[in-house]
Image (spheres, grey):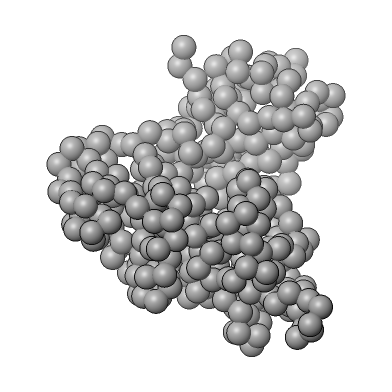
Amino acid sequence: MHYIDLRSDTVTQPTKEMRDSIYHAQVGDDVYNEDPTINRLEEMAAEMLGKQAGMFVPSGTQGNQICVMTHTQPGEEIILEEKCHIITYEVGGIGRLSGVQAKLLHGNKGVMAPEDIEAAIREEDIHQPKTGLICLENTHNRAGGTVIPMDILKKTYEVAKKHNIPVHMDGARVFNAATYLKLPVKEIAQYTDSVMFCLSKGLCAPVGSMVVGSNEFIQKARKYRKMLGGGMRQAGFLAAAGIVSLEKMTLRLQDDHYHAQLLAKGLNRIAGIKVDMDTVQTNIIICDISGLKMTGTEFSQRLYDKGIKINGGSASTIRFVTHYWIKEEDIEITLNAVNSIIK
């Protein structure tokens, strides 16, 4: 049975062009810095985000954890939004790997206010940890793929520099943010000291994420990557797909956003389902189905029986994510299926 898979943009399969590029890739040993395709990808990523250097990592989670390790010292505190990926989905890694504690702030649709960030920065006090890092997520997954406005991003960076604190961005979907803002991605990255972004979500590569920052930062981060088992050998086969991601797939994300709008508007017209349209900025849709008197798990199972995969859970919320392999006809089929479940 063919399924329409709206669980996540992580389910994307590589395109034919990516598969061909993998087959023909020139490779070497990346731990020796001898893989020409990896080197090219890292240079491209750094250039696109306006940073000095880049580093390929197997996953976004590893990339985030490496960045926290590189920026901080054990015993420090880092500031994060309360529902961000680093806190919610990375297995307590900041405590286990970096030995830091988290200061969690409430965000408005995933966006922390600069004044709240400044208020959370620790004063010099023998009893308190030092604030070692500010982490941002852009776009914000659990808030519904929301984007940090540029003025807030700029003010946050100014607060950070005032207090001599680095800023790391979990930019797993930062190209979606750039598409929404209609800006080059380096305009966003200028207000950060490091950025991690994924190649394997909306950009369709089969494996991999990138970390970018200064030459000094990346040199230090490479040692932590090796420590965590991320030093790979002929990784150019993976990098070849990543190059296609940067050259081609970053230019078409507006299609995914358009399909998300179609789906969200259609869902919002169905009795018992509510979507906060202000959060549908990119390719993620969070729905409140409490009016249907069923859990997300129950709803997702009924859709699965009709050939559609989504993420559910014990709460009365569900998530849809559009991506390269979702077309306009899939949106229509999905809405018809949801309507049939309600009726």
Where residue 273 appears, x then y in whole percent? Answer: 76, 32
Residue at image point 84% right, 29% down: 291
Judge left or right: residue 80 versus residue 182.
right
Of 299 and 119, nearer the camera is 119
Residue ID at (55%, 31%) = 6
Quadrant of res 337: top right
Q: Is residue 78 left or right of residue 186?
A: right
Query: Is any part of residue 182 visible from this angle?
Result: no
In the rendered image, which quarter contains the C terminus? top right
User: Which residue appears at 18% of the width and 49% of the height?
Assistant: 27
* Left or right of residue 120, residue 150 in this image: left
| Residue 52: % across, % down | 35, 74
> Residue at horizontal 70%, vertical 77%?
130
Between 329 and 155, the one lying in front of the other is 155
Q: Residue 339 placed where, x, y %?
A: 69, 21
Q: Identify whether 106 is placed above or below 189.
A: above
**Res 47 seen here:** yes
Q: In this view, does 306 lie above or below 244?
A: above
